[in-house]
Image: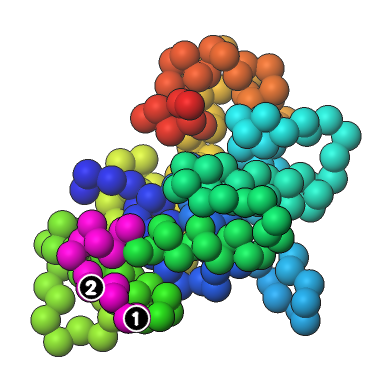
């Protein structure tokens, strides 16, 4: 179990969503494992993030001003900046392109690059086909890492088994019971325990505060100290530039 479930599921999510949703979702999952989703309502896309504090953190590290902004507005800014920075890293010119067009190009470049890394042929294939093959390959590889037999299993069932197995292993590390709980709730508990542990290490007062309030305080008032100690939400150097 070399990588966290969150990073793995982010990559799978990136390949299962539309190009418009994939990049920002993958970015946030890759960074901290917090859940994001886009709800399509006609031409309107509504972005929802489970943690305003982590959204604020990502905005700060992208150089985006957060003071006085609504979370929906901030999420849109983060989304746009992630795409632009990804385009720069991939050598994709952005001049004269709208955000949707640029995002599609970035999405294409990312899945082709990852497919080539895994030895998947991309020539003459549509992005949707490449993404499907890549998603299935990654799920099977993760299953093998976890010792889960893959023979004769439907890819959806295998994905579910991989996710549940890995979440349970992470829950065991934190002595969290998984009985009768869905994966989202377990992940939330893990995050809450990480937040409380960080607060304890930072000597923070936590009485009458929920985990989101504490996390926001860590990011706002203990940013440098938490980053230096590499404790949540800076563990494993995830936010190092």
Looking at the rendering, the stretch of residues picked out in magenta corresponds to 113-125
Q: Position of residue 17 (x, y in %)?
A: 51, 71
Q: Is residue 180 visible in the rendered structure shown here?
A: no
| Left or right, residue 156 beside residue 93 | left
| Left or right, residue 13 beside residue 224 | left
Tag 1 secondary structure: loop
Q: Quadrant of the rendered structure where residue 147 is?
A: bottom left
Query: Is residue 119 a member of the stretch shown in magenta?
Result: yes
Q: Where is residue 58 in the image (x, y as percent from the top left)?
A: 61, 37
Determine which of the numbered discs, if any, sits on residue 20 in the image: none
Q: Residue at horizontal 68%, vertical 59%?
A: 97
Q: Magenta stretch: dominant SS?
A: loop
Q: Residue at horizontal 38%, vertical 50%?
A: 7
User: Which residue is nearer to you in this view: 182 or 6?
Assistant: 6
Residue beneath disc 2: 121
Neighbours of disc 2 within 10 Å: few (<14), some (14-19), many (20+): few
């Amino acid at each position: 179990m070399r990588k966290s479930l969150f990073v793995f599921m982010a990559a799978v999510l990136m390949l299962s969503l539309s190009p418009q949703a994939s990049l920002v979702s993958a970015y946030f999952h890759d960074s901290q494992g917090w859940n994001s989703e886009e709800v399509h309502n006609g031409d309107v896309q509504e972005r929802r993030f489970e943690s305003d504090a982590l959204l604020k953190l990502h905005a700060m590290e992208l150089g985006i001003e957060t003071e006085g902004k609504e979370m929906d507005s901030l999420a849109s800014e983060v989304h746009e900046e992630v795409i632009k920075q990804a385009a720069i890293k991939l050598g994709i010119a952005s001049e004269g392109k709208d955000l949707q067009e640029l995002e599609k190009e970035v999405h294409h470049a990312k899945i082709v690059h990852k497919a080539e890394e895994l030895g998947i042929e991309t020539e003459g294939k549509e992005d949707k086909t490449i993404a499907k093959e890549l998603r299935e390959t990654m799920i099977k590889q993760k299953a093998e890492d976890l010792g889960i037999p893959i023979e004769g299993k439907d890819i959806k069932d295998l994905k579910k088994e991989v996710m549940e197995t890995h979440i349970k292993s992470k829950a065991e590390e934190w002595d969290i019971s998984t009985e009768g709980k869905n994966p989202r709730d377990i992940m939330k508990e893990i995050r809450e325990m990480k937040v409380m542990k960080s607060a304890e290490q930072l000597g923070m007062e936590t009485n009458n505060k929920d985990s989101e309030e504490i996390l926001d305080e860590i990011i706002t008032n203990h940013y440098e100290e938490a980053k230096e100690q590499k404790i949540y939400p800076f563990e494993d150097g995830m936010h190092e530039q």
